[in-house]
Image: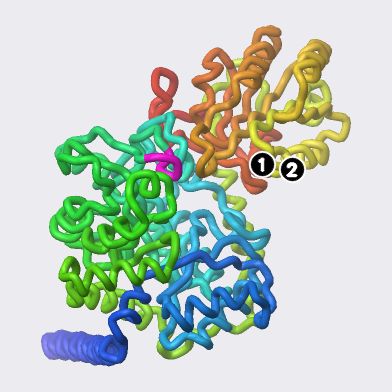
Amino acid sequence: MKKLFVLFLLLGLFVQQFVFAQTSKADKKAERWVENMLRSLSLREKIGQMVMVRMSGEFTNLNSEKFAESRRQVEENRLGGFIVFRGEANSIAALTNEMQRISKLPLLFAADYERGLRMQLRTGTPFTTNMGVGATGDVLAAYRQGKIIAEEMRAIGVNWLFAPVADINNNPDNPVINIRSFGANPEKVGEFAAALAKGVRDGGALATLKHFPGHGDTATDSHIGLAKISANKTQLEAVELVPFKTAIGDGVDAVMTAHLAVPQVTGDDVPATLNPKISNDILRKELGFKGIITTDAMEMGAIKKNYSDEKSVVMAVLAGADIVLLPADAKKTIDAIEAAVKSGELTEARIDESVRRLLSAKYRLGLTENRLVDLAKVNQVVEKSENVREANATAEKSITLLRNADNILPMTAEKANKTLFVVIAADDDPIEGIALIPEIMRRAPKAKIIRLDLRSTKDEYEKVLEQAKQFDSIILAPFVKRAALKGTVALPENQTKFVREMIDLKKPVAVVAFGSPYLIRQFPEVKTYVVTYAIEEVAQTAAVRTMFGEVPFTGKLPVSVPGIFEIGAGISR
């Protein structure tokens, strides 16, 4: 028995040494490729690797003037990658393939698919928001979501995900993070962010934590102006940095810096993107992050309003950025960084550091072996039925019942026929109510459903108020879209007034909030309140299923609503 144990021990050591030797061999092969490529590049070509500009995913003829611009960025400016916006799955796959063919080096294609391809495309597995995922309490759901997103991305030629969001939404008035955050508990946000990042990596794509050092405790949209957080170093380490520490410790490929200032930490108002005290001192030295640092979009108001284009890109590289994302002009950006090297403001060794990281990432992605995707497989990988079921189940588990004093919920078809349903759309977006209305009608064909939006007149609102008196109960479904440059996640005042007037009718009223859970602060007197955390169709369908008792309410609030609800609130029904 003792001899058998020794034999197994020796076998284990042999396997361990074999794996180590193979890993070491692979690492050396990667290092040789990186160094060979680095030596083959001119200074301008190396700088080009550090610049990423916008690429439309819309159908484009490859011989058109429109595509000629993308071709020029690859062939003349030698850019290292692009960030993809909009489009369709098949057209993106065709475009990325062509651009990979004409590029000297493999290209990185990134996208902001935080909740999947559906965030920008009409196709893809339709996930709910991060806050919705946080409301399920299921960390594995975040992992599975990350893996599915990565697999669908890789199928269309996109290999770098600008997610997960690791910001803690601890400011109810935050207009830019809000439901993009997993919640307000630093440890929980860290767990979910790390899980989603691992899923992305296991799915074969690069994952990115954003927005360092944390964009949650501000009411300013950095697309519009410079955001500031008031935390000192102790507070920053105890709250904002916790999710980043967790996910960096678990292994993550990249970190995106935020266009926000932390004056009590740095002693100045220089945004993190341009500030070595944040990117270099805290992220690199204190947290030990060795991966890629990318800026947020340099075209955003927080940067554009305070710095010239040429100055800001040089400051970003000096601060530690490996990728300058969406500068105003790619050629002028390369010119400015090259001039900074030639003047001695930057060193070529500093440029080499960044290019090594980027080339290593391309090698890890397998782009040196095969940089093209199989166009025939796009329709087999994207939007698999089992993945759609996974996304629907997560959305259903997220729906959170916070008050039910009037016992309106769950609904029956009979009860629904005596209920007035009112969709209140705060934005000029047809998605608001697009699935909710037919899903209710499918269950209660005689139900009365009205949609009011920004174009609805005062008389139309008053007419609905009068109609409401004829019904036994009322369900109000306010939709508020979180969007860049909007600057608010509140319901407009005229619609808030309408909700309050409905409540004043003294009939049983339920508010089912699509979007921010903080909407109840505008009408705290409502006695039945449900949160969906999203405006998308997947959340609308999930809400109807819970409203009609087809699945239980199980979601728990991952943030607090000051003076009204604590973290973890939620009625299981």
- Residue under the point 74% across and 43% down: 434
CB under 8 Å between discs 1 and 2: yes
Tell me the quarter of the picture where residue 530 sits: top right
Few, some or many residues within 10 Å of mark 1 (<14, 14–19, 20+): many
Quadrant location of the C terminus in the rendered image: top right
Q: Along the polypeptide, which appears first: circle 1 or circle 2?
A: 2
Front residue of this view, candidates 236 and 325: 325
Q: SS of the residue at dot 1? A: helix
Question: Could you say where residue 53 lies in the image, as x and y percent from the top left?
Answer: 47, 66
Outermost residue, right direction?
A: 446
Looking at the image, which is closer to me, 288 or 382? 288
Amino acid at circle 2: Ile
Left or right of 443 on screen, residue 257: left
Residue under label 2, please give it.
434
Q: List the residue tagged with mark 1.
A: 540
Q: Which residues are magenta?
A: 221-225
Q: Residues within 10 Å of mark 2 (few under 14, many from 20)?
A: some
Please determine whether, in this image, residue 419 is positioned above or below residue 281.
above
Colour logic: rainbow
